[in-house]
Image (cartoon, rainbow, N blue to C red):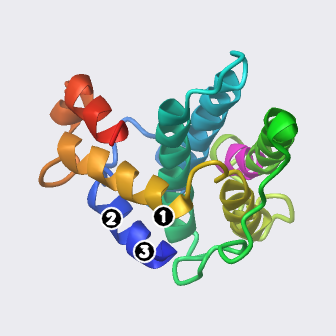
């Protein structure tokens, strides 16, 4: 599976409803980019929390990593960046020393958080300052989707990115058999989803 194929699966489960209560000067693209960046922030936090116990739970790691990839694909799609690209490190996965893998993953997640935070600054300027696209600090190009994809691909170890994508989409097909629905998002069958994650 390549990133474009994965993105097609992501878009099937991405909600496209634009709430009436959203600020009037916020276009749909900004709404979706905000959704992707906020989602990435929460998933990266959950990945970081998984590094606290002495033994890393690889089922949970794969789930949260898959959710982070989902938001990265959504971001790439709405910024028209990277949809047709293979991930940067597909042919040379980084495998840190077994005794140092947690420190390696922590550093990679810290770098990802810095990149996502820079993207949130662009969103903040667009939403709260109503800054035009011509403003030097509120241009879409400042959101480094390529770096986000690169770092996500480097933290694939010890699970394979293709497997992460496939399991992520299988979980979401279980949650949303047809397409995204608010009702199904709020009433998940977590037991059935966990069985998929454990395969």
Q: Which residue is mark 2?
A: 9
Where disc 1 sits, the SS reads helix
Q: Nearer the viewer, mark 2 or mark 1?
A: 1
| Residue at image point 67% right, 55% down | 152
Q: First in sequence: mark 2 or mark 3?
A: 3
Q: Which residue is mark 1?
A: 162
Q: Quadrant of residue 53?
A: top right
**Neighbour tally class for label 3: few under 14, some 14-19, many 20 plus, Cα within 10 Å:** few
Q: First in sequence: mark 2 or mark 1?
A: 2
Count of numbered badges drawn on the protein? 3
Q: Which residue is mark 3?
A: 1
Q: Is residue 188 visible?
A: no
Indicate left or right for 161 with 13 as reference: right
Q: Is residue 47 visible?
A: yes
**Neighbour tally class for label 1: few under 14, some 14-19, many 20 plus, Cα within 10 Å:** some
Residues at discs 2 and 1 in contact (Cβ within 8 Å)? no
Where disc 2 sits, the SS reads helix
Q: Depth check: 180 or 153 in front?
A: 153
Residue 10 vertical placement versus 4 (above, below): above
Q: CA distance from mark 2 to mark 3?
A: 11 Å
Q: Depth check: 166 or 179 in front?
A: 166
Quarter of the C terminus within the rendering:
top left
Residue 21 position in % (x across, y down) = 37, 35
Residue 178 position in % (x across, y down) = 12, 54
Q: Which residues are magenta?
A: 119-126
Magenta-drawn stretch contains 23: no
| Residue at image point 57% right, 57% down | 72
Residue 157 vertical placement versus 162 (above, below): above
Quarter of the N terminus within the rendering:
bottom left
Residue 161 position in % (x across, y down) = 55, 60
Q: CA distance from mark 1 to mark 3?
A: 6 Å
Of helix, strand and loop, which mostly describes the magenta segment? Answer: helix
């Amino acid at each position: 599976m390549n990133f474009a194929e994965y993105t097609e699966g992501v878009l099937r489960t991405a909600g496209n409803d634009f709430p009436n209560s959203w600020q009037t000067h916020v276009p749909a693209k900004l709404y979706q980019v905000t959704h992707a960046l906020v989602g990435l922030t929460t998933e990266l936090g959950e990945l970081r929390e998984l590094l606290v116990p002495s033994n890393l739970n690889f089922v949970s790691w794969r789930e949260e990593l898959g959710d982070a990839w989902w938001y990265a694909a959504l971001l790439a799609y709405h910024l028209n960046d990277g949809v047709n690209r293979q991930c940067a490190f597909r042919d040379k996965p980084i495998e840190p020393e077994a005794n140092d893998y947690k420190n390696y993953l922590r550093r990679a997640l810290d770098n990802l958080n810095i990149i996502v935070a820079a993207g949130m600054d662009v969103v903040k300027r667009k939403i709260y300052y109503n800054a035009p696209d011509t403003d030097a600090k509120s241009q879409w190009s400042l959101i480094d989707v390529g770096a986000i994809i690169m770092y996500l691909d480097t933290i694939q170890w010890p699970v394979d990115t293709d497997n992460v994508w496939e399991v992520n989409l299988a979980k979401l097909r279980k949650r949303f058999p047809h397409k995204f629905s608010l009702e199904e998002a709020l009433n998940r069958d977590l037991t059935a989803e966990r069985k998929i994650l454990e395969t």
